[in-house]
Amino acid sequence: MSSMFKRLAALSLSAGLAGSALCAASAASAQAAPKPRAQAGAPADAPPAALDLSDCPDVLPVGADPADWYCNVLVTSGGRMKIGNIDQQITAPMTMTMLFGVDPKTGAEITKFVKMRSTAMTVAGGALGIPGTEKIPLFALKVKPQYGGAIDMDIANRKTRIALKIKLVNQLLGDKCFVGSAAEPIDLDLDLPDILPAPGPDGTFWIKINAVDDAFAVPKTNGCGFAAPIADLRGGLPSASGKNSAQLTSYFAGKQYSEMYPKMTVRTK
């Protein structure tokens, strides 16, 4: 197995990606390198053009061994989410950066959320649910997924939990209108039926993850002021379990800190 796949095998184990994902990595290492994919306008089933580690902190806990720590990135680039009355295609990537490592004091494996980046996506039908009104500024509606306070990747058991909240963007809703909150997030308990190796055009070894959940509930809006009843009516909120669904296509990769920062000096956070 090449050094690249040895590192990815270690990364897979570090995040619980055992079993099928590790076997897939071994199989992929024996194949010829894939042809690079086009970076511009790549389809949702293509891995990212490059592994962006810009959100990875350059500081680890006191006494941490950089060889035992990884910066991991999860990019959700395709799929759909049906939340109440709104069936939204994923048209812009959602990126979560996480740290995984060994606690220098206890020896326990720990995962720390670092940052989530996302772009607001246009909702077809706008705030009124009328086709074509999404192009009218006053009636345009966008949704921007944000971190809801929890992420637990257990890919070895083909499960991942992600808590989200969704910001609603419209001129009449103000700047604090959300579906879900830290206290009551949209709690996705995702099954992972497909986990596949997906080498990227820059040589990064990505793991492709298809995830599904059709049993989560969605709360009513919060922070929407006088427009809350309208927002809840448009969204069909609150929406009980069984009326919502998520089918997400994501890519997971990372890098060891000893490789990212060969001369890293570990400091106190």
Image (tube, helix red, strand yellow):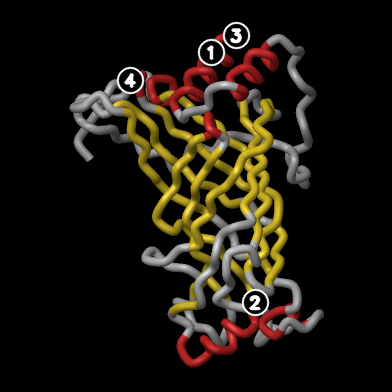
The residue drawn where x is 43% and y is 40% is 98
Which numbered marker is on residue 141? Answer: 2
Q: Is residue 122 above or below residue 146?
A: below
- Report helix, strand or loop for mark 1: helix
Q: Is residue 55 above or below residue 82?
A: above
Residue 144 on image: x %, y %: 56, 65
Spatial separation of the CA atoms under disc 1 and disc 4: 21 Å
- Tell me which amino acid carries mark 2: Leu
Which numbered marker is on residue 2? Answer: 3
Spatial separation of the CA atoms under disc 3 and disc 1: 6 Å
- Report helix, strand or loop for mark 4: loop
Q: Viewer-nearest of labels 4 and 3?
A: 3
Q: Which residue is mark 1?
A: 6
The residue drawn where x is 76% and y is 27% is 36
Q: Viewer-nearest of labels 1 and 4?
A: 1
Closer to the camera in the image, 54 or 249: 249
Spatial separation of the CA atoms under disc 3 and disc 2: 48 Å
- Tell me which amino acid carries mark 3: Ser
Could you tell which of marks 1 and 2 lies nearer the N-terminus? 1
